[in-house]
Amino acid sequence: MPVPNRLMDLAPEIKAWRRDIHTHPELGFAEHRTSQIVADKLASWGIEVHRGLAGTGVVGVLRGQPGTGTIGFRADMDALAMQEVNGFEHRSQTPGAMHACGHDGHTATLLGAAKYLAETKNFAGTVHFLFQPAEEGGGGGRVMVEEGLFDRFPCDTVYALHNDPALPLGTAACVPGVIMAASDRLKITIKGRGGHAARPHTTLDPVVVGAHVVVALQSIVARRVDPIESSVISLTMFHAGSAMNVIADTAEIQGTVRALSEEVRKQVAALIEQVATNTAAAHGAVAEVEYIWGYPPTTNHVEQTERAARALEDVLGEGRVFRDRPPVMGGEDFSYMLLARPGAFIRLGQASPDGTGSVPVHNTAYDFNDEAAPLGAAWFARLAERELPR
């Protein structure tokens, strides 16, 4: 795989950065140590550093040879609120937090590309390195855009990558159109009337009503959404009461809702409100629905996806870039940047034949495969050279 020799020389350094960040994970909008590391390294390489967007966001500005073109490369920095079970030396030292999605690897990968491009400057124009906080549900990408990211740091195009444990190391997926789902959250409060568990006839049991609501909501995707379309309603929490012999006054149901199109997204949101309130009313109870709109679908722009794929082929070789993988129902807040600027989001394989890098993301035993980082860094660098030719 034609990764520049200099980037291969940097591989041990990138690995050390990544493992240090993994050892000290930080949750969304609290990436103070991580953002300081990023800012210090960028500055040490002569890259202009700007801080403060979305709180802990960092933007590095690198000007190459004379030129007017601009490009943005994004990496996310936050960890997940999970307890790591791994026993290796670089495991998380922060209770209840771990890099279970590989954002440590994304950050180190982009730092590697930044160092290489700062040394070579084999491009004409400006590269913006966008290190964002709070991808995991906090919407850090949205906040950065709303706070004027692209007004202050103009980008003709924007690109990002995500590791993929389902793809072999040395391969990547680069697909135009919708590649990831909108991701919304849902909270339903069932209001009944509590009382003694021995006298249920004097109560209005919110648990029973809530159970009917849960079952009824499953019919929305099965019977109300076009089978050609895709949507998922996952009700993941059901809480009620505090004593086994007491029927509670209220019950609370929470979960997520996902769809691949804005039309289906709006349809499902309206149906959830209708089905939940009417099902509760049929039992004499009240359902209050709080629908929290989250990330929009992640949609790659056709022209920029093709450009990204060509740069990937330069690095990985012919036949190692998949262009027809189906979308996934996970969400990604790079979607906000793709709404603001044309660009593409790729998935970089990290599963080695020996099993390294094959544990799925959001798993307590996950770890980023350090062998993928030089490949990702080489892609960023090659894309800059292709898009901003001297």
Image (cartoon, helix red, strand yellow):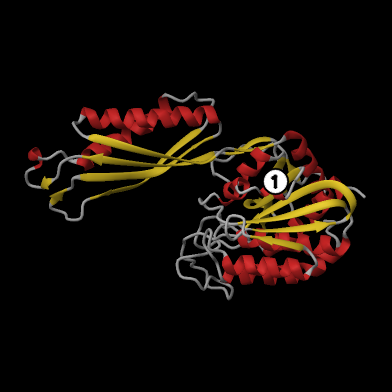
Q: Is residue 222 left or right of residue 346?
A: left
Q: Nearer the viewer, residue 169 or 194?
A: 194
Q: Is residue 2 left or right of residue 281?
A: right
Work out which residue is located at the far right of the displayed protein and give it.
390
Q: Nearer the viewer, residue 371 or 93?
A: 93
**Residue 347 appears in the rendering:** no
Residue 209, picture quadrant: top left
**Please, what secondary structure does the residue beneath circle 1 have?**
helix
Q: Position of residue 86 (x, y in %)?
A: 52, 69
Q: Which quadrant, please, contains the N terminus?
A: bottom right
Query: At 11% across and 47% down in the image, what residue appears?
Result: 197
The residue under label 1 is 151
Q: Is residue 167 above or below residue 105?
A: above
**Residue 387 appears in the rendering:** yes
Q: Position of residue 277 (x, y in %)?
A: 29, 31
Work out which residue is located at the far bottom of the displayed protein and give it.
89
Q: Is residue 328 left or right of residue 225?
A: right
Residue type at mark 1? Asp
Q: Position of residue 42 (x, y in %)?
A: 74, 66
Q: Nearer the viewer, residue 15 or 282?
A: 282
Q: Position of residue 26 (x, y in %)?
A: 54, 65
Query: At 62% across and 59% down in the image, what residue appears?
Result: 52
Query: At 82% across and 43% down in the image, what residue appears?
Result: 310
Query: At 86% across and 65% down in the image, what residue appears?
Result: 119
User: How many circles with numbers are drawn on the protein?
Assistant: 1
Q: Residues within 10 Å of mark 1 (few under 14, many from 20)?
A: few
